[in-house]
Image (cartoon, rainbow, N blue to C red):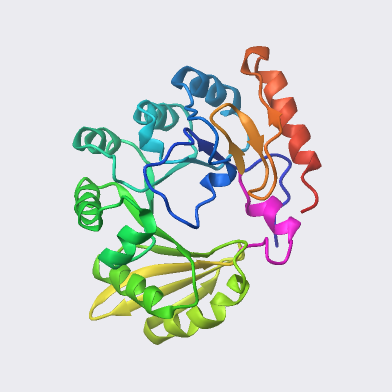
Amino acid sequence: MMKEHDFWNKLRILVTNKCNYRCPFCHNEGQDKDNSADVMKLTDFISFVDFMKDQPISELHFSGGEPFLNHEIVDMIEYADKNTTWGIGCATNLSRLTDEQIHRLANTRVKFNIQFPYADKDDFHKSTGTGSYSHIIEQITKVKKAGIRIGLNSVVQSDDMKHIQNLINFAIKYQLPLKLLPQIGLDGSDKFKELIYPLLKETSIEVKDKGTGALRWIIEKEDKQTVVLYIDSPCFDKDITECREFGELRVHPDFTLQPCILRSSNVRLNLQEGKEKAIEQMTCLWNDFKHC
């Protein structure tokens, strides 16, 4: 049974709308790619966290754009780590992460969710436009060695299951959890699971319905094991109940708020008006979030 929330349970903080990749499926978390570069300031982020830290929030996810193009991102993660009890995630392509940043973040509870479109060098470069497959493998190795939790996120862009099988094999080889997310707005993407489930069954030893729109598969091959999540979007069925339970509020670099990836962000927090006003704005947005 779903628990009723009365406020946003998860927040996604878009600390910049800039990205050094050019993935064709990317919606930049709903941002207009023609916008001029916008970067969230650390001082504003701190004010926002201080306003929200006594609210019933379970998870805070950093995103963008590529969050490590914001030079204050590590300070932001460290502040959230020290001043909240929330789960902390960061969606990144890893390409701009430095050794010094890895060292600092190893002392936090952040988990990296790596944007990883293909487990093939040529396809990876073609999809990202600028990404280096070999460099990302090196980065993954460094992050794992530092003890930072890490997982792969891959948007399923076609019904070519060869690419999905390669991703599954890669995840098993490096023993990394893998999230597969069908591309929203792509014809036929609501049916991808009918092709992917049989692949997962071939090497799965356990499957569990998480009740969040996701199936969790434990995959084992050649004495190696990992977890694969297939997350079917509630957008396909316009399931507002599931969205309210498991969706995120997206906070853009200029503090406009976006309740859904398919909706515009037309409410802007005025942090200068203080905590009560900010929470009132977010509460009103939550109360209005009742239909797709």
In the image, residue 263 above or below residue 256: below
Residue 276 included in the magenta stretch of the image: no
Give 130 or 53, whichever is nearer the viewer: 130
* In the image, farthest residue toward the front: 34
Q: Is residue 206 left or right of residue 33?
A: left
The answer to whether residue 65 is above or below residue 178 is above
Closest to the observer, 84 or 104 = 104
Q: Residue at x 24, y 70 (%)?
A: 173
Q: Which residues are magenta?
A: 233-248
Percent from the top left, x then y, of residue 59? 52, 43
Q: Position of residue 70 (x, y in %)?
A: 39, 30
Quarter residue 219 falls in: bottom left
Quadrant of the rendered image containing residue 115: bottom left
Left or right: residue 169 compared with residue 38: left
The number of numbered discs placed on residues in the rendered structure image is: 0
**Residue 4 x, y percent position in the rendering:** 73, 50
Residue depicted at x 73% and y 28%: 281
Q: Residue at x 35, y 30 (%)?
A: 74
The residue drawn where x is 66% and y is 19% is 270
Locate the N terminus and report the quarter of the image it occupies: bottom right
Question: In the visual, does 35 lie left or right of 8?
Answer: left
Q: Position of residue 22 (x, y in %)?
A: 41, 50
Quadrant of the snapshot with the C terminus: bottom right
- 103 or 81, which lies in front? 103
156 vs 71: above or below: below
